[in-house]
Image (cartoon, rainbow, N blue to C red):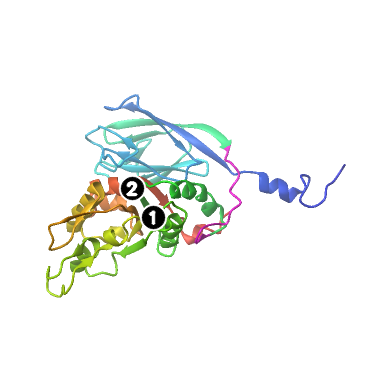
C-alpha cells in the first residue's frame, strides 16, 4: 500500500512522535591529582545534576585538598555537558579558561583545584520515548521537561528516602510533595507542612518540635510540633533554605535519631516521618556561603528533584 489512514505508521505525524530526542552520555576521568584514575559517567537520560567536591553529599567525592566541599555541578543538557562552578575557592577551568558556566562537547580538559579531568562524549543514543502521561497526581504539565520527571517521581513515591524538591517560585513544589505523599504507602497518614517563610524565627523551634505548657511566655498549653503531627506520614518543610542556621542542628538530630524533645520538656518522643524539603534557593550555593549546614544537606538530599522553570515548559 502506498499510504495509510491517519494514525497508522505511514502517517508522518506518528513518525515525528516516535522520534525520541537525542541525548548524550559522558565519561569523565581524573588524569591528574590525588584521585587520578577515578572515572565516572554522566547520563543524559537522568534529569539530575551530579555534584563534584569533597563533601559526603557529592556524588563524585574527591580527596584533593584544593577542591572545595561543593566545587561544581555537571549535567547533560541536550547533547552537551554543562558544568557550573558553585562558588569554589580555587575556580573551575575548561582548557585553561576560568568559567562560571560552560557547555562541553567532549575532548576538553577540565581542572578543579589540583585535579585535571578528561571529558569524553561516550555515546550518542536516542532516549526512551517520553511518557504519555501529562501529570503526576496534583502536579500537571505536558511539556517534555515535565514528562521526563514523572518516571523518577513515580519511583520516589514508592520509596521512603528524604527528598529535596528544588525550583523557582510557582513551579509546583508543594503540589509535587503532596503527590509523592498521596501515591506512597503513607497516603492514609498525615501530610503536614511547615513553611519556614511564614513563621517568626523565634517560633520556628516550637513549630518544629512542639512545646510544653509554660515553656515560654505565651505557652498556655502543651502543643505538638510538626514532627509529632506528621507521625506515621509525611512532613514537608517548605523553603528549608530559610531555616535559621542555629536551628539546623536540632532538625538534623531529629532526622538522624527519629526522636524529638519538645521545647521546655525532657521526655523524648519517638517519631516516624518521611521527610520532604522544598526550596527556591540554590542549597549548594547556600552551603558554600555557610548559610546551610553541609551535614544537614547530606541527610535531606538523598534524592533530589529539580522542577524546570515555567519559561522552559513550553519548549519541545
The quadrant where residue 18 appears: top right
Magenta-colored stretch includes residue 44: no
Q: Residue at x 54, y 52 (%)?
A: 147
Tell me the tag on residue 301.
Answer: 2
Cα distance between the residues tagged 2 and 1: 10 Å
The quadrant where residue 108 appears: top left
Whether residue 66 is visible to the viewer of this picture, yes or no, is: yes
Whether residue 278 is visible to the viewer of this picture, yes or no, is: no
Find residue 156 and report its horizontal and vertical position in percent.
Answer: 44, 47
How many numbered marks have been drawn onto this rendered protein structure?
2
Find residue 47 and report its horizontal and vertical position in percent.
Answer: 47, 46
Q: Secondary structure at mark 1?
A: strand
Tell me the tag on residue 288.
Answer: none
Q: Residue at x 22, y 65 (%)?
A: 204
Give the magenta range.
126-140
Q: Is residue 142 left or right of residue 63?
A: right
User: What residue did someone put label 1 on?
Assistant: 166
Magenta-colored stretch includes residue 137: yes
Amino acid at each position: 500500500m502506498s499510504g495509510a489512514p491517519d494514525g497508522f505508521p505511514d502517517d508522518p505525524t506518528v513518525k515525528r512522535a516516535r522520534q525520541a530526542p537525542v541525548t548524550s552520555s559522558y565519561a569523565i576521568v581524573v588524569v591528574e591529582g590525588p584521585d587520578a584514575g577515578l572515572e565516572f559517567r554522566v547520563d543524559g537520560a537522568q534529569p539530575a545534576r551530579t555534584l563534584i567536591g569533597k563533601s559526603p553529599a557529592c556524588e563524585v567525592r574527591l580527596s584533593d585538598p584544593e577542591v572545595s566541599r561543593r566545587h561544581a555541578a555537571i549535567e547533560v543538557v541536550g547533547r552537551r555537558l554543562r558544568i557550573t562552578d558553585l562558588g569554589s575557592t580555587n575556580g573551575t577551568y575548561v582548557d585553561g579558561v576560568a568559567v562560571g558556566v560552560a557547555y562541553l562537547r567532549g575532548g576538553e580538559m577540565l581542572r578543579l583545584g589540583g585535579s585535571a579531568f578528561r571529558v569524553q562524549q561516550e555515546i550518542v543514543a536516542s532516549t526512551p520515548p517520553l511518557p504519555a502521561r501529562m501529570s503526576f497526581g496534583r502536579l500537571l504539565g505536558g511539556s517534555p521537561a515535565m514528562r521526563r520527571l514523572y518516571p523518577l517521581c513515580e519511583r520516589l513515591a514508592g520509596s521512603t528516602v528524604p527528598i529535596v524538591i528544588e525550583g523557582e517560585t510557582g513551579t509546583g513544589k508543594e503540589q509535587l510533595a503532596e503527590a509523592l505523599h498521596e501515591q506512597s504507602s503513607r497516603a492514609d497518614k498525615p501530610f503536614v507542612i511547615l513553611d519556614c517563610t511564614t513563621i517568626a524565627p523565634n517560633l520556628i523551634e516550637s513549630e518544629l518540635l512542639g512545646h510544653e505548657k509554660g515553656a515560654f511566655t505565651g505557652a498556655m498549653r502543651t502543643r505538638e510540633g510538626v514532627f509529632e503531627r506528621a507521625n506515621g506520614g509525611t512532613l514537608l518543610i517548605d523553603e528549608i533554605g530559610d531555616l535559621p542556621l542555629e536551628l539546623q542542628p536540632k532538625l538534623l538530630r531529629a532526622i538522624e535519631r527519629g526522636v524529638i524533645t519538645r521545647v521546655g520538656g525532657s521526655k523524648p518522643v519517638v517519631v516516624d516521618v518521611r521527610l520532604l524539603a522544598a526550596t527556591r534557593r540554590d542549597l549548594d550555593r547556600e552551603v558554600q556561603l555557610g548559610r546551610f549546614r553541609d551535614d544537614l544537606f547530606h541527610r535531606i538530599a538523598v534524592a533530589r528533584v529539580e522542577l524546570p522553570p515555567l519559561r522552559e515548559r513550553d519548549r519541545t
